[in-house]
Amino acid sequence: MSERMIERDEATQNWMKDSQVNSIRNRVPPKGQLGPEDCQECGNDIPMVRREHGYELCVECAGRREVRHGR
């Protein structure tokens, strides 16, 4: 494998990591604000720790969504 190909692969991996970090950061609500109290899909309560991180779905609904979307 040439040095140029290795550099390109490293740049691609760095871009993917940066994209994932930015995606996570975009989900976190501004300091002092919480996510919703109730799940946006089923209406069940969302635990405080999930609300503090800006999640809008309960654990069960988030899991189902991940399975549907192949994550």
Image (tube, rainbow, N blue to C red):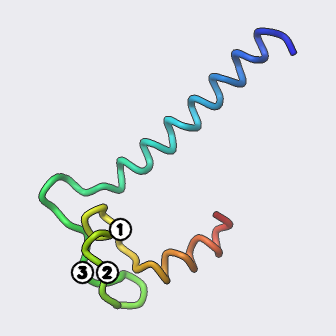
Answer left or right for 66 relative to 6. left
Residue to which mark 1 is pinned? 55
Q: Position of residue 22 (x, y in %)?
A: 42, 42
Give the Cα separation between the discs numbered 1 and 3: 10 Å
Above or below, 59 against 25 in this view is: below
Q: Position of residue 43 (x, y in %)?
A: 34, 90
Give the Cα separation between the discs numbered 3 and 2: 5 Å
Answer left or right for 59 relative to 46. right
In the rendered structure, which amino acid carries the disc numbered 3? Glu
Quarter containing the N terminus: top right
Task: Give the tally of numbered discs.
Answer: 3
Above or below, 45 against 63 in this view is: below
Quarter containing the C terminus: bottom right
In the rendered structure, which amino acid carries the disc numbered 2? Ile
Give yes or no for contact between labels 2 and 1 (Cβ–Cβ under 8 Å): yes
Give the Cα separation between the discs numbered 2 and 1: 8 Å
Q: Residue at x 29, y 69 (%)?
A: 49
- SS under mark 3: loop
Q: Residue at x 56, y 31 (%)?
A: 15
Query: What number is the disc on residue 46?
Result: 2
- SS under mark 2: loop
Badge 3 or badge 2: first in the primary sequence? 3
Q: Position of residue 25 (x, y in %)?
A: 36, 47
Above or below, 70 against 16 in this view is: below
Residue to which mark 3 is pinned? 37
Badge 1 or badge 3: first in the primary sequence? 3
Quadrant of res 70: bottom right
Q: Residue at x 16, y 62 (%)?
A: 33
Furthest toward the front, the residue is 49
Label 2, residues with CA under 10 Å away: few <14, some 14-19, many ≥20: some
